[in-house]
Image (tube, grey):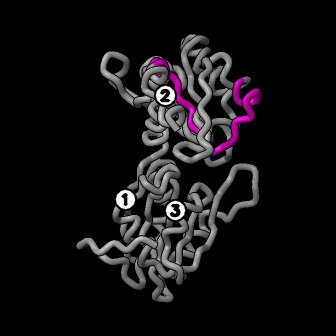
Amino acid sequence: MIEDTADLPNLEPGWVWLVGAGPGDPGLLTRYAVRALGQADVVVYDALVGQGVLDLARPEAELEYAGKRGGKPSPKQPDISRRLIALAGEGRRVLRLKGGDPFIFGRGAEEGLALVEAGVPFRVVPGISAGIGGLAYAGIPVTHRGINSAVTFMTGHDASGDVPHDVDWPAIAKASPTIVLYMAVKHLGEIAAKLQAAGRPSGEPVALISRATTEGQQVVETTLGSCAEAVAREGLQPPAMVVIGENVRLRARLDWLGRIGEQD
């Protein structure tokens, strides 16, 4: 456990803090997140929170798993929200720890709205999203002057688990030089086909980033036309990010993490 004596607010009994744990590397936690880990009575964490982060919780804290993984038995979102409300109602100091940022494809808003309806006080602590931090660890800038002045962040599936049906794919393909996809590995072939049908070239560079910022990080560079095959060929496992755009070419020079590995 890390002691943090900074003049920050305390996680009080009966409160819930919705905290982003970042993409995996414990060093990317905010001071608020470390504060909460050192004070929480119970930590309700999701599937993307690594053991290195959980190890920072105080020894007396109870750890409750509430992870969701596609295709596997998972707790229902309403059940998770009810659990947070119940724990706060017991006067516990509750830390809801979510991978990345709780408000970026993290269902933090759903939990926050449930807490509001139940009259439970809460705080939101942003975290570094994998769509930014994960790309940086792969040596890929989300924006770069001369390449893109816009970027689109998207999820690869909707609430039903299918490719989002309410997305204007032609508009996305034409308007956004860089596209960053969360949770898209399962449907990557279909998504790539939609983008190519809307005019994106099959040779456009794509990077696939698995387990970003962790010791198991894997980065595969491919093209839009070949990205689905690359997933199968390389045995890429979720969680993974997909980056589509010319920004990917900068990795050849900006792969700082790879250079550190070479020096080691």
Left or right for 151, reference 185:
left
SS for callout 1: loop
- Residue farthest toward the front in the current orientation of the protein: 264
Q: Which dot, 1 or 2, sits closer to the camera?
A: 1
Does residue 119 appear in the picture of this structure? no
Q: Spatial distance from mark 1 to mark 2, Cα to Cα?
A: 26 Å
- Residue 254 place in picture, x, y as percent: 43, 26
- Residue 182 place in picture, x, y as percent: 56, 40
- CA neighbours of label 3 inside 10 A, class few (<14), some (14 to 19), many (20+): many
- Residue 245 place in picture, x, y as percent: 48, 21
The span picked out in magenta is 230-249
Point 54% across, 66% down: residue? 54
- CA neighbours of label 1 inside 10 A, class few (<14), some (14 to 19), many (20+): some
SS for callout 2: strand
Q: Spatial distance from mark 1 to mark 3, Cα to Cα?
A: 11 Å
Residue 30 image label: 1
SS for callout 3: helix
Q: Give the amino acid type for the residue marked by disc 1 in the picture.
A: Thr
Q: Give the amino acid type for the residue marked by disc 3 in the picture.
A: Val
Left or right for 84, reference 222:
left
Q: In which quarter of the image is residue 140?
A: top left
Q: Mark 2 — residue?
A: 179
Which callout, 1 or 3, points at the residue further toward the start of the chain?
1
Point 57% across, 32% down: residue? 242
